[in-house]
């Protein structure tokens, strides 16, 4: 493959016309809720772009993010992004290992100085000199600093990279920190979620490739197109919430009728993500549609919010002030319900514990 | 852990979206007829129920033209029973990835791009040379 050619040239040699770019542009514009006219601009931008060098670093993580991104539901269309990037380093996906792998990373950095994108999944342990995660004798922190210094932009994929995630959960034994605290002033996109929605990753990368700049981000560095609304804003159970019709447990009459899951711990009102509209597994369902509340996995410190099955408004102490405010504003009807739900919660948790024994 | 809570289907009542979209399309077709300005309505981000979609499909129907495009998966294009009002449905695998109403003489995706045609001209010339080359190569028996 000739690396000096643009993407249109590369595709043309494989017998694929510019219709592919128009189709992909329509898809991304639709994903990102851009005006349909943006489809053509995206298509033209992508067609004229060169293959984007991407270096993917994995730190304290579970590989769930990579699993999510490589198992997209629209393989022909969504995987096209892998034709538009050159994944020059990814420990899980690359064939080489050891020194040869490190050489590949160094070669990609040298060849694309100032132009490559660093994607990171996982948080970085800083305690005790970072000894809790090392690769080839170097700490995650050293590898990150070294790789990011000549990058064009950084994409932190998954809640561990974006906000610290599970490794940073109380008591944070390794001193884990999010990527944003270690990359200085480099342009950064956070695609949070545990795991993140693959379309959010595809959309953000395609946008950067087409327009050469970052998409519009929220105050936590997440693309507004995917994180601009809460799960609650677009939840199909919302009419039940508005009417004050709540499931009190996972096996009661309300649950069977599809009532709102607020009282059984749904964090939808304070969680910004696209699950309610994009859904998972090819649009089949999302957690709330399967009968379980949202865990709030795309928000900072979601492991430490006082329990996945506790109603939102009760343990506000653990939340940041902005989240707490949102919870109160968004849950006017739910607050009273939440208080009365505590007793149901306790009995549900107690019976669940008993079942385990 | 499997939740004993019954999974529930999203509510399937029509939200009146079909009528609102049809009114929007009428205004856009009127503008197209007067000025030639094209427009696209993306059905993707709209909170339409399956019933809304079925209602819209029934109303728009199918007209004289339909085409299948085979590019990074399937794309179906058809003119509705209303001239100048097209449906463009892109698939990624078996799933609908993008669902559009286009108001135009012809949806853009059906046109051949002149830059593709430029390389097609070169490709055709090469293919012709090759054809002659193959024809003129004597058979080795
Ligand atoms: S609280 Fe949860 S289940 Fe209820 S409407 Fe909001 S997001 Fe949906
Ligand atoms: S529904 Fe909530 S917990 Fe589940 S994936 Fe979406 S944001 Fe995360």
Image (cartoon, helix red, strand yellow):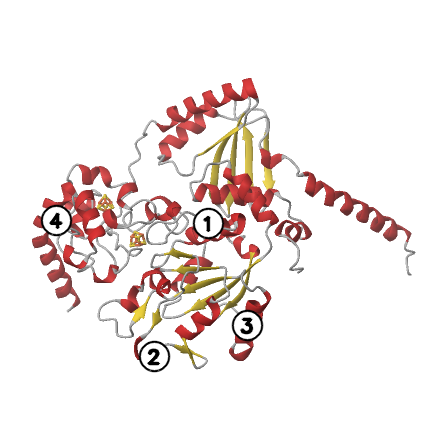
Callout 2: few (<14), some (14-19), or many (20+) C-alpha neighbours within 10 Å?
Answer: few
Q: For disc 3, does the CB lie below 8 Å from ligand 2?
A: no
Give the letter of the chain under mark 1: A
Residue at image point 35% right, 56% down:
A192
Contact, CB < 8 Å: mark 1 with mark 3? no
Looking at this rendering, what residue extends furthest in the bottom direction?
A: A137
Label 3's element?
A: helix
Query: With A346 as the anchor, is A303 left or right in this view?
Result: right
Give the mark nearer the N terminus: 2 vs 1: 2
Query: With A11 as the anchor, is A356 left or right in this view?
Result: left
Nearer the observer, A203 or A216: A216
Residue for badge 4: A338
| Image spot of residue A68 (x, y percent) | 41, 58
Rounded to the nearest angstrom, the CA distance separating label 3 from label 4 is 54 Å
**Label disc, if present, on residue A106 of the rendered structure:** 3
Rounded to the nearest angstrom, the CA distance separating label 2 from label 1 is 36 Å
Residue for badge 2: A129
Q: For disc 4, does the CB lie below 8 Å from ligand 1?
A: no
């Amino acid at each position: 493959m000739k690396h000096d050619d643009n993407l249109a040239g590369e595709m043309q040699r494989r017998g694929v016309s510019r219709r592919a770019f128009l189709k992909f542009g329509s898809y991304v514009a639709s994903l990102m809720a851009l005006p349909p006219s943006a489809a053509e601009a995206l298509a033209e931008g992508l067609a004229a772009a060169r293959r984007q060098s991407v270096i993917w670093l994995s730190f304290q993580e579970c590989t769930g993010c990579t699993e999510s991104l490589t198992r997209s539901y629209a393989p022909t269309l969504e995987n096209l992004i892998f034709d538009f990037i050159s994944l020059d380093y990814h420990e899980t996906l690359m064939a080489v290992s050891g020194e040869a792998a490190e050489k590949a990373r160094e070669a990609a950095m040298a060849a694309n100085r100032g132009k490559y994108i660093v994607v990171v999944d996982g948080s970085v342990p800083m305690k005790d000199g970072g000894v809790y995660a090392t690769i080839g004798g170097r700490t995650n922190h050293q590898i990150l600093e070294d790789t990011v210094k000549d990058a064009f932009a950084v994409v932190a994929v998954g809640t561990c990279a974006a906000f610290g995630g599970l490794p940073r959960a109380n008591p944070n034994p390794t001193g884990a920190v999010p990527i944003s605290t270690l990359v200085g002033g480099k342009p950064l996109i956070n695609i949070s979620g545990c795991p993140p929605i693959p379309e959010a990753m595809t959309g953000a990368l395609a946008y950067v490739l087409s327009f050469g700049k970052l998409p519009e981000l929220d105050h936590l560095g997440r693309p507004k197109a995917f994180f601009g609304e809460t799960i609650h804003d677009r939840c199909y159970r919302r009419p039940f919430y508005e009417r004050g019709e709540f499931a009190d447990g996972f096996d009661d009459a309300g649950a069977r009728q599809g009532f709102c899951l607020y009282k059984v711990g749904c964090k939808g009102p304070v969680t910004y993500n696209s699950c309610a509209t994009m859904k998972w597994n090819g649009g089949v369902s999302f957690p709330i549609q399967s009968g379980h509340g949202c865990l709030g996995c795309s928000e900072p410190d979601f492991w430490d919010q006082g329990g996945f099955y506790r109603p939102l408004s009760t343990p506000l102490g653990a939340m940041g002030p902005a989240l707490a405010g949102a919870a109160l504003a968004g849950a006017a009807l739910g607050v009273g319900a939440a208080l009365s739900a505590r007793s149901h919660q306790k009995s549900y948790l107690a019976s669940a514990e008993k079942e385990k024994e | 852990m499997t939740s004993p809570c019954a999974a529930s289907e999203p509510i399937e009542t029509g939200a009146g979206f079909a009528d609102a979209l049809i009114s929007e399309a009428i205004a856009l077709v009127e503008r197209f007829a007067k000025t030639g300005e094209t427009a696209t309505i993306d059905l993707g981000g709209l909170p339409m129920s399956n019933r809304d979609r079925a209602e819209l499909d029934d109303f728009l129907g199918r007209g004289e033209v339909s085409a299948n495009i085979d590019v990074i998966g399937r794309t179906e294009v058809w003119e509705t029973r209303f001239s100048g009002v097209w449906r463009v449905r892109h698939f990624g695998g078996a799933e609908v990835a993008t669902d559009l109403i286009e108001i135009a003489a012809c949806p853009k995706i059906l046109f051949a791009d002149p830059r593709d045609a430029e390389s097609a001209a070169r490709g055709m010339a090469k293919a012709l040379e090759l054809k002659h080359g193959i024809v003129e190569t004597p058979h080795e028996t």
